[in-house]
Image (cartoon, coloured by chain):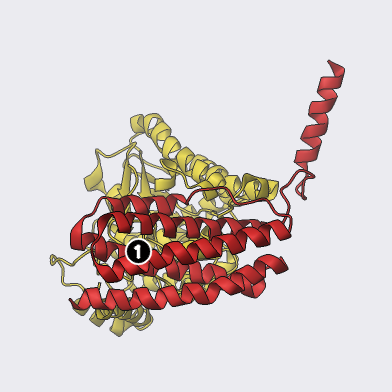
Amino acid sequence: MHKILLLIGGAAMAWSGTGRAADMPPGSRQTRDFVEAAAQSDAFEVLEAQTVLATTRDPAIRAFAQRMIHDHGETTRALEQAVAQSGLQPPAPGISSDQAALLGALQSLRGRDFDVAYVRQQVIAHSGALAVEQLYAGSGDDPAVRQAAAAATPIIAAHLAIVDALRAKLDGA
Amino acid sequence: MKETTRREAMTVATLGAAAALTASGAARAQDQARPRGGKQDPRDKYPKPPFKAQMQPWPGLAGRMDPRPDHGETSYVGSGRLSGRKALITGGDSGMGRAAAIAFAREGADVAINYLPEEEPDAREVVDLIARAGRKAVPIPGDLRSAAFCRELVARAVTGLGGLDIVVCNAGRQQSIASILDVSDEEFDQTMKTNIYAPFWIIKAAVPHLQPGSAIIGTTSEQAYDPSPDLYAYAQTKAATMNYVKSLAKQLGPKGIRVNGVAPGPIWTPLQISGGASTGKVVTFGATAPLGRPGQPAELAGIYVRLAEDDGSYTTGNIYGAGGGQGQP
């Protein structure tokens, strides 16, 4: 009985401090948050692209979606390698609750409304992803992950340029 | 949406903020910007994501946000709905508190605003706007995490205004932290003190001064009903706020005091760009809302007025929302 109480007391003491507990996952909060955000962003892009390929006939939008599946597969692998190299925990699978809301909204549309919504969401999602990658590439504290962010930045910037052009075309039509 | 439409909307918001700084300009812009009784497309009325990545140290200033939020500086037109009322608003320097302060003053109320000393630049603009509405402004800077200050705040508001009959507990602390493992005891405590203890201390000190017909309003959130994973600490305080509104409404109804809450969705305020949202979320802010953009504080001003005014006399224990199409209530 005493032993159990002592153990509980010890655990409570380990958690009561405001500093870093011994059983925290490896890596700084900045790095862990970035890895999670980048992985969610890749997963979101692939899920939206798979939805596009199952829904739309527009060849330009289909081509963009194919590229998303390919490129975000590559950035996911590069991120996984950096994470392994730095001894970090792999990111949890899945997308964020905000991304889930966007995906749900997209999947309820058909036809031209679908295309317009996809392209609009992609402009916003890539703008957010670009800001996140640029920030970590510039100030991240893990060298391998920083390198992955630096490599992903021009890829995402290129996607943003394409989708900006797609949006201009759709708005003009 | 067409690029020109977005640029125009942003220009209107920017011009609005600039015009607020000159008295005659404010009046003119007000006449031109929004004819009363007309209608506008809610999707195009204000800026949409993507926004510029931006981060300010807590608590952040509205004056340094890009685009500047609209608190109704040039658009809100009063019609005497709060004539002679005396209001205290915490967090009255920016965000929904500022929108309420401007609206209350233009509806004929004298207004005391509380804010953190770091927020003085935003607060000075609000004091000026209240004065230009011809009403008395009582600025009371200070940190709500102190019980002694909260009691002093109410005492100074009562003295400065010559009474008190509207209390808006609006100030809040919000920090986006992805993992509970990274939430420090200090951070959790700061959030609880600001969002839960302060309204308790303030309302407890205010109730003895509130005559029948008075109103208490708490700012809750869509987060009370559907919390985001990175807002573990903040979201539970908003659930508590929703709950205390209903409890106090039952307790104070028999004394003729109404208690209600406002539940905003994603609103463009300094709370978001000073740690309340991640960088990715700031850039995409409001994208999840069916209206496709974040709300502006000005779009909630009328709700605070409604809950405070005598015409809303049967509304108590209720939560009014402005969620852009998402969330509860």
Q: Say whether residue A24 is visible.
A: yes
Q: Position of residue A64 (x, y in %)?
A: 36, 69
The residue positioned 67% from the left and 62% from the top of the image is A82
Question: In which quarter of the view is residue B244 placed?
Answer: top left
Please tell me which residue lies in front, B211 or B217.
Answer: B217
In this rendering, the answer to whether A115 lies above or below B23 is above
Q: Label the red chain with its letter.
A: A
Residue at far top of view: A1
Residue at the disc numbered 1: A121
Q: Amino acid at mark 1?
A: Gln
**Considering the numbered disc 1 on the image, is that residue within a helix, a strand or a loop?**
helix
Residue B76: x and y, percent?
27, 67
Dividing the image into 4 quarters, which one contains the N terminus of chain A?
Answer: top right
Relative placement, left or right, of B186 versus B156 is right
Chain B on-screen colour: yellow
Most extreme residue toward the left, as rendered?
B38
* Residue B104 picture location, percent across and down: 33, 60
Q: Is residue B320 above or below residue B95?
A: above
